[in-house]
Image (cartoon, rainbow, N blue to C red):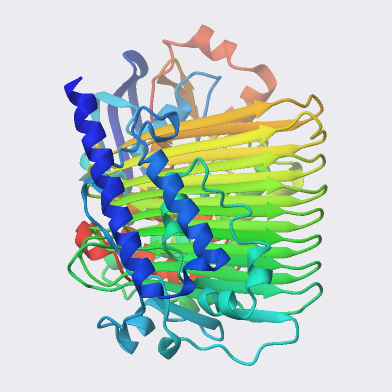
Amino acid sequence: MTAHTAMTDEAARVKEWYTSRFRQLERALNGESRTPLHVLRRDALARFSALGFPTTENEEWRFTNVAPIARAEFAPVLRYERDGVSDADIERIARGTGDAIRMVFVNGHFAPEFSSIPPLPKGVRVESLGAALKTDPDLVARFLTRQATYHDNAFTALSTAFLLDGAFIHLEDHAALELPVDLLYIASGRTSPFVSAPRTLVVAGRDTRLAVVERYAGLAQNMYWTNAVTEVFAAEGAVIEHDSLQTEGGHAYHVGNTHFLLAGKSTVTSNAIVLGGAFVRNNVSAVFDGEHAECTLNGLAVATGTQHVDNHTAIDHAKPNCASHELYKAILDGASKGVFNGKIFVRKDAQKTDAKQTNKTLLLSDEATIDTKPQLEIFADDVKCTHGATVGQLDGEQVFYLRSRGVGEADARDLLTFAFASDVVSRIHAGELRAQLDTMLHARLLQGRVAAEDLCTP
Amino acid sequence: MNLLEVRNLRAAVNGNVILDGINLTVKAGEVHAIMGPNGSGKSTLAGVLAGREAYAVTGGEVLYKGKDLLSMAPEERAREGMFLAFQYPVEIPGVTNMYFLKAALNSIRKHRGQEELDAVEFLSLVKAKLKMVDIDQSLLNRPVNEGFSGGEKKRNEIFQMAVLEPTLAILDETDSGLDIDALRIVAEGVNKLHAHDKAIVVVTHYQRLLNYIVPDVVHVLMDGRIARSGGKDLALALEEKGYDWIKEENGTVPAGT
């Protein structure tokens, strides 16, 4: 029972650590402790304390050991500080974003001095979640945690317990927003381990169109943890493109829980690109809440060194006549480790479901590994569901074809690796992000191998 | 000048002997056709010449422009002016035809000590070549061979040949899968690219391509050896009588030229 006792001690220590941080937060809040938001936080902390961090005995965490997160004492960042972040840092990360509405957050807190929000059209709100919680708590409460429930998710529970700020994007029915919204979640270079809880809440009303980019970027090789939660609501007929680009620092931990809820006839496209971080776990879920909706989930992870990148996706065909397309790719070099788990549920009444899942992994070294698991649970009978997973090296015939035209072997291999990644990147509609990614991948995949430390930030 | 000299070439795949002593000499300005029944080793010969690694050369030698071809990597062969038009052109999703060809042409130009072309220069160069094989410019921005019809793939091979301007082109069953119009376009393209200092080796199963690309020499490959060589009339005889008569006469006919 020694192991068990050790684990219990560890769990008790984790609980004590975050509970004491929470008490610190309450002191700082000073009088806000009776607000509904704080009641929510307290409930979430209680849930986290009961759940504790998952272990590898939990099927959902079989291939991803979060013990390092549990062991480290990450201090939640309780208030906004500029923390040494400069305009040049922002420009470097957001270069080429052009005419976007830009919200910058430092360690999870809105940084108005770096942000630019032009006058917005009628019916459109783009503001910090902290502000929205003060000015319109009822509106926020209608959506917040509706998808990101924390009952059985320790990470969402902890993120919610320390929910202080984030982005709030709200489009009323038929509101028109031409500009894309660029959210920059920046981790500062502070040296004591810290955790931020960036929260993104996106509500797109009926027949609206919206493009949102979430960027998570680290500025240094310090140890920190980003514990992000995103909830996206697509009302009937809404068309949303949600892109994320993760370039966390080389010693960073990143856990992301992203949820999409699709009403009838809505269209959601998610492109999730992971380039940085030492330890990464992303859960992306999409639930069909109406008929004739369409969801596309694309993902690309490029990892090297000892990076660990775990992508879990879940698509719930809860309603008939919906289509989902999923393409997740990984390029693993060095001794990096990838995990992919793709769940697709087709409920009993979800007839005429069309679901396609593809997972492809390119292993560039003998030491890189991937654990991949498609998981389809189909309870309806009139459906079209396909899935395919491939793991392998570059196609020898393609390499030969390029060489037979004069392209050198190393260049041919780099070019094919780049092409493997481009397949996902080319699906991003946001032109400036796509161009930026092309440049980044070009540098990373086409100009020889780079040390993991150089890969975190653009 | 001898561009290509194949001397007693032997090759095997997975331990099976496919080429059993090939002798072949191709001079500048010549067009050679290599015909033969299925499984006679035609595509293996083309593959060995282009440097395909699946084939193990077990004997003989190949001189290209007087240099030892078999010791050269596939890309070196290409840079030295060899070109293989694939029987089954390879699809490369994520790489546009334009990017692919520009990378190929520039590696060849670099090898020759020429300036690399930028995007604008490259585009003006390829535009003229597109016309030659009746290919739409939109093809440049499509991924290499992905979603191309069989005919488009073969035309794309000849388009690449037109851009890269090889000294020795080996066309491996370029006619298969082509309708008569596409065959004519492809053949006309090849003919335009032919010159007194270049050579073409056409590997084909059927005679019909040779109505358009007229060979100087026709070789019949059987059981890994050249069983008979002759002029263009040999191809017509094969069309009429098949291959069996050569088998029967074999032994009395000297192999090679």
Side of A367 relative to A403 (left or right): left
Residue closer to the observer: A105 or B115: A105
Residue closer to the observer: A94 or B245: A94
Residue closer to the observer: B24 or B153: B153
Residue closer to the observer: B21 or B138: B138
Q: Position of residue B139 (x, y in %)?
A: 63, 60
Side of B34 relative to A457 (left or right): right
Side of B246 relative to B47 (left or right): right
Q: Is residue B14 above or below residue A162?
A: above
Q: Position of residue A139 (x, y in %)?
A: 68, 70
| Residue at left offset 76%, top offset 64% | A238
Q: How many marks?
A: 0
| Residue at left offset 44%, top offset 65% | A198
Where, quadrant-wise, is the C terminus of chain A in this rendering?
bottom left
Q: Is residue A46 above or below residue A92?
A: above
| Residue at left offset 81%, top offset 68% | A207
| Residue at left offset 60%, top offset 45% | A326
Q: Position of residue A131 (x, y in %)?
A: 54, 80
Q: Is residue A184 above or below residue A44?
A: below
Determine the image quadrant of residue A218: bottom left
Is residue A321 among what the camera can see?
A: yes
Q: Position of residue A300 (x, y in %)?
A: 46, 52
Where, quadrant-wise, is the N terminus of chain A in this rendering?
top left
Side of A111 relative to A202 (left or right): left
Is residue B125 among what the camera can see?
A: no
Give the farthest residue toward the bottom.
Answer: A119
